[in-house]
Image (cartoon, rainbow, N blue to C red):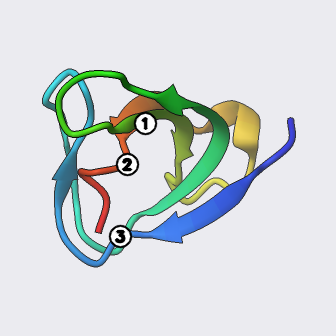
Amino acid sequence: MKILKTIELTEDCKDIKGVGIPKGTKLYIVWIGDKAPFGDGHRLMKCRVDNGTGHMDLMPETVVRDTEIK
């Protein structure tokens, strides 16, 4: 699995389902979608949420908007 970016959250955020992701969590971005033609022009990003195991296969996968990440 190829990691495109690694982001450490500086503020709490939510994924597209509304599940909270706490500040300080690392997100490993594995896919970045195209820019949305509506709304604020956000991009969807599929990422793995670091859970402390160190193994990408064991980390939960979620989708976040790039406008939610700070």
Local secondary structure at mark 3: loop
Q: Position of residue 33 (x, y in %)?
A: 56, 28
As shown in the figure, which amino acid type bears the numbered disc 2? Asp
Q: CA distance from mark 3 to mark 1?
A: 17 Å
Q: Are marks 2 and 1 in contact (CB under 8 Å)?
A: yes
As shown in the figure, which amino acid type bears the numbered disc 1? Arg
Q: Position of residue 68 (x, y in %)?
A: 24, 51
* Residue furthest front as drawn: 37
Local secondary structure at mark 2: loop
Q: Position of residue 35 (x, y in %)?
A: 46, 32
Q: Is residue 25 above or below residue 37?
A: below
Going from the N terminus, do you reach mark 3 or mark 2 first? 3
| Relative depth, front residue between 10 and 49 | 10
66 lies left or right of 55? left
User: Which residue bears the numbered disc 2?
Assistant: 66
Q: CA distance from mark 2 to mark 1?
A: 6 Å
Local secondary structure at mark 1: strand
Q: Residue at point 25% right, 26% down?
A: 16
Q: CA distance from mark 3 to mark 2?
A: 12 Å
Tag of residue 43: 1
User: Which residue bears the numbered disc 3?
Assistant: 9
Q: Are marks 3 and 2 in contact (CB under 8 Å)?
A: no
Q: Residues within 10 Å of mark 1 (few under 14, many from 20)?
A: some
Q: Residues within 10 Å of mark 2 (few under 14, many from 20)?
A: some
